[in-house]
Image (cartoon, rainbow, N blue to C red):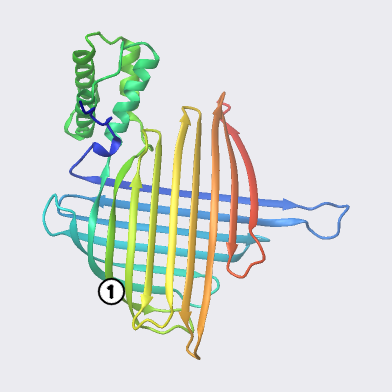
Amino acid sequence: MALAAPLSLCDYQTPETLLVKAKLSFTYHYLDDPSQPGIEDNSGRISLTYTHIYNSPSQGFSLLGSGTFGLSGFRTVSSGIDLTGTYRYYFQEQKPFFGFGGFQGSWSGQYRSPRLEVRGGVGYGRFTDVTPLAQAMLIEEDLLRMGAIPNSLSDETLMAVAKEIGRRMEYEKLADLVAKVQELIQNDTGVTLGAKAILDIEGRIKETGRKRFCGGALQAGVGYVVLVPAGEERTPVLDLSADWAMAPEPRSQLLIRTSASASLPWKGAYNLSLAGTYDYEINDTASFAAKYTLEHYVYALSEGGLGTAGRQSAVFDLNLNVHGWRITFQVALERTEGAPGWTQEFTVSAGIDLR
């Protein structure tokens, strides 16, 4: 007798998906020891990321951006900005095949001018917002922990709860949605939920900032470089890209994007980029996040030969909320091509609301 596979977050399907996420961080360190000549350290970093993804049965678009600025003496000494935009048109609703058009732009302090490429082609894949099912699973987890229900909910009930949460905008009052979720849970478990359990359900539904996504997309197309850094040639290019999103469980999210392009006819020049983020909510008072980016460029020089440039960066954050204190531990690593080693930064910050 075959056993049914356990319910996965990626089993949830929704007609529309919207992800908007932005993050900005700033660190600076100044150290002047009177017993030593000069200033020991006077440097910092500004990092920012932006993600906007929308998907519907007939169309979708994505806008992804990131930037890093290295500071010394409150002056910018290194910088890098990347921005990618794509519009997708699905040939048939509910089918994953699509045509697309878009652009990719980048700028680095190593260049005198930015790089901008326009592109078009075909692809396969979709993204789905599975946040409602993640909320349903967290509600079940909370109710089991407080002893409000005697056993786990059935997969059918979890999915029914998720679908109601996904229809939140159709409810005039939040209380009506909470009542519907309460009804589904009580019908499954045969118990009456108390006031504490009902408040917990309402709190989980109202939560923001915990978006979960599944799916992916593969794209292949051709483009043309409109703007190039000094020394490069304007040529047609072949573009390949892959995006992937996975929510292993309700408290975590993994996002990966890769892209590669090569000039046509190919003479050894290409661009390669990789970006990955992982977020994990350890519990209600602690969370962990990691981000890694890789950029590598090989370009043809006007005087002949090939030039290279690139950078890597990794940022790790541990966030704690302990007795009202918000504490963050951050480790940031960065290395530009040709540098002798990695720039390393360790930052600890803490804050509390006194009133």
Tell me the residue at 46%/27% (across/down): 284
User: Looking at the rendering, in which quadrant would you find the N terminus?
Assistant: top left
Q: Is residue 77 left or right of residue 239?
A: right
Q: Secondary structure at mark 1?
A: strand
Q: Nearer the viewer, residue 202 or 268?
A: 268
Tell me the residue at 21%/9% (across/down): 190
The quadrant in which residue 153 appears is top left
- The percent position of residue 42, horizontal first and vertical second, equals 71, 57
Quick check: 53 above or below 211?
below
Q: Is residue 54 left or right of residue 351?
A: left
Quick check: 71 above or below 155?
below
- The percent position of residue 235, horizontal first and vertical second, equals 35, 83
Seen as rendered, the residue at the extreme right is 35
Seen as rendered, the residue at the extreme front is 1
The quadrant in which residue 167 appears is top left
Tell me the residue at 54%/50% (across/down): 315
Q: Is residue 229 left or right of residue 323?
A: left
Seen as rendered, the residue at the extreme left is 92
Tally of numbered tags: 1
- The percent position of residue 295, horizontal first and vertical second, equals 48, 65
Quick check: 266 above or below 82?
below
Q: Which residue is mark 1?
A: 222
Q: Nearer the viewer, residue 49 or 287?
A: 287
User: Looking at the rendering, in which quadrant would you find the C terminus?
Assistant: top right
Q: Residue type at mark 1: give it.
A: Val
For the residue carrying disc 1, how many other residues have a C-alpha within 10 Å: few (<14), some (14-19), or many (20+)? many
- The percent position of residue 276, horizontal first and vertical second, equals 44, 52
